[in-house]
Amino acid sequence: MTFRKIVSKPTLIFILTSILLLIGIPYGIYGLKLDGGASLGGALILMADFVLFIALLIDRAIVNKIPPKRLSIYEFVFLILCITIYLHSQRKLIVDIENENVEYLLVIENPGNLINNETHLEFPFNKRISTKKSIVIVDKMTKNIDFNINADWNKSYYYNRYEFEKYPKVTFYCKSSLDFKRDMNQNLIDSLMNK
């Protein structure tokens, strides 16, 4: 296959992978020349370049069977689907705590008998909760939880996830100086919720 034949039928994947390979290969080689753990970044970039090269080869094989414009539409739909799946997997719960005196934050997935906090959707898949309390009840626990608080412990805190019979999914944040972080159990959650 000649170079002219390879580039004669450009598609979306062909253009994107070509640009990314032209940028990625020099950066990957440069990264490999760095000392210590920094060279791992170069190796990761070159591995990503290898995956892009495989995608480029597949694109060039398919373009001989499907017209380039139609293939570009399929590739565009595929890319949008991949980006949507990635963004959905990275969705976050953002909790804005409007009380500076809060010493802990307890996020509980509703087992069915509690009242959820009001959530607001944010683009693309994030949820935001504003509260003055230290306990947040959500319909479904997410792995990524960010919280905003003006108190001094926001920068340094204890964090853990728990599973109990009564409360199947619990995420707990507190000031590093609090004692009850080691004694987290269902009874403690009950007492905190009744405060």
Image (cartoon, helix red, strand yellow):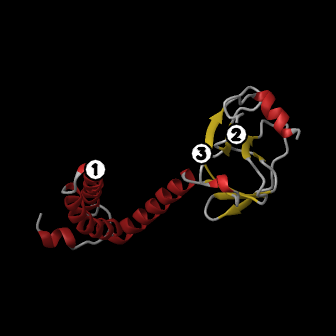
Residue 74 left/right relative to 143: left
* Most foreground residue, 110 or 187: 187
Q: Amino acid at mark 3?
A: Lys
Q: Residues within 10 Å of mark 2 (few under 14, many from 20)?
A: few
State which mark lies toward you, 2 or 3. 2
Which quarter shows the N terminus? bottom left
Q: Which mark is residue 143?
A: 3
Q: Which mark is residue 178?
A: 2
Q: Amino acid at mark 2?
A: Leu
**Mark 1 vs mark 2, CA separation in Å:** 38 Å
Residue 115, percent across and down?
85, 45
- Please report whichever mark, 1 or 2, sits nearer to the chain's N-terminal start: 1
State which mark lies toward you, 1 or 2. 2
Residue 53, percent across and down?
25, 57
Q: Amino acid at mark 1?
A: Leu
**Mark 3 vs mark 1, CA separation in Å:** 26 Å
**At numbered mark 2, what does the secondary structure look like: helix, strand or loop?**
loop
Query: Which residue was labeled with disc 1?
Result: 40
**Mark 2 vs mark 3, CA separation in Å:** 24 Å
Residue 50 left/right relative to 99: left
**Label total for image:** 3
**At numbered mark 1, what does the secondary structure look like: helix, strand or loop?**
helix
